[in-house]
Amino acid sequence: MAFVQDLKEGQDVEHKFAELIRELYGAKDIEFPPEWAFKRYDFKVTYKDWSTETYEVKSDRKYPVTGNFVIEYECYGKVSWIYASTADRIVYYVWWKWWVQDREVLIERIKDVQKRETYWWDNNASAMYVIKWKYLPYLFDLLDFDEQPDVKEND
């Protein structure tokens, strides 16, 4: 898949999740960094109580075929995605479900799971962990949007 198409699909998933947060979690405002900015997170949510959270949203289209998902940690010899992000929460859209975790908790839990390292994208410039699907429930919490959220009040 071409980079431009891959980027667009990723942005579509980010916006879809942002709208779910707006509708279900009582978001007062959602702010996406400007397109030209170097982003350390995908968007920032301000809730009605004026608290804020930042989110990094990823998706994996190949999961149904491979049974794996990936977490990038280095690109062109520099820390990237999971270690470079400053997001409060990491969201992963896998198999039509939303998984979420505090970034620091996720980083610690990644240390405990079986994974293999691989290189891919842009002439193998990106280093990433390949992790079996069975570890998703350990690494992330499944979001159930049918239940009333207990993270933020809806006032």
Image (cartoon, helix red, strand yellow):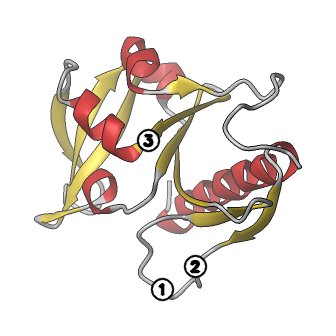
> What residue is rendered at 29% in x and 48% in y?
72
Q: Nearer the viewer, residue 148 or 136?
A: 148
Q: Residue 30, percent across and down? A: 73, 67
From the image, tell me which residue sits under label 2: 33
Marks 3 and 2, how far apart at CA:
20 Å
> What residue is rendered at 24% in x and 43% in y?
128
Q: Residues within 10 Å of mark 3 (few under 14, many from 20)?
A: some
Q: Which amino acid type is shown beneath numbered disc 1? A: Ala
From the image, tell me which residue sits under label 3: 102
From the image, tell me which residue sits under label 1: 37
The local secondary structure at tag 1 comes to loop
Q: Residue 10, percent across and down? A: 58, 55
Q: Nearer the viewer, residue 104 or 136?
A: 104
Residue 107 against residue 34 in the figure, above or below = above
Q: Nearer the viewer, residue 144 or 1?
A: 144
Outermost top residue:
134
Residue 112 against residue 152 in the figure, above or below = above
Quarter of the image where one finds residue 8 = bottom right
Residue 117 against residue 1 in the figure, above or below = above
Quarter of the image where one finds residue 39 = bottom left
Return the disc, 3 or 1, that comes first in the chain's sequence.
1
Q: Residue 23, percent across and down? A: 87, 48
